[in-house]
Amino acid sequence: MPECRECKDEVTKLVTVKVAGKARKVCEDCADRLREAGEIAEASESVMQGMMGFKGRR
């Protein structure tokens, strides 16, 4: 059985998720957590750029 690289549990199915430009094979639960963390990081970066008056984009 495949093993999740995030939580190290054996699962029936792995999902591929891009994290910081790299593809990672993790279970469904970890994939949801990583997606949420990515969305939060993106939103916080946007807020910080707005506070600092940054007009460009990376």
Image (cartoon, helix red, strand yellow):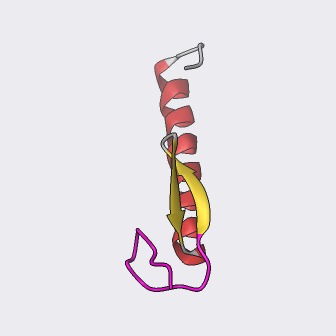
Q: How many marks?
A: 0
Position in image of residue 30 (x %, y %): 51, 71
Position in image of residue 38 (x %, y %): 54, 51
Which one is in front, 57 or 14?
Answer: 14
**Residue at screen point 50% across, 85% down:** 1
Residue found farthest to the front: 1
**Is 28 included in the stretch rendered in magenta?**
no
Q: Which residues are magenta?
A: 1-14
**Is 12 included in the stretch rendered in magenta?**
yes
Which one is in front, 57 or 8?
Answer: 8
Residue 28 versus residue 42 in the image, above or below: below
Q: Quadrant location of the C terminus?
A: top right
**Residue at screen point 56% across, 76% down:** 29
Position in image of residue 50 (x %, y %): 55, 26
Residue 54 versus residue 44 in the image, above or below: above
Please give left or right for residue 7 compared with residue 17 in the image.
left
**Residue at screen point 50% across, 46% down:** 41
**Residue at screen point 52% across, 40% down:** 21
Position in image of residue 23 (x %, y %): 53, 50
Q: Quadrant of residue 31?
A: bottom right
Please give left or right for residue 13 compared with residue 5 in the image.
right
- Magenta highlight: main SS: loop
Which one is in front, 34 or 43?
Answer: 34
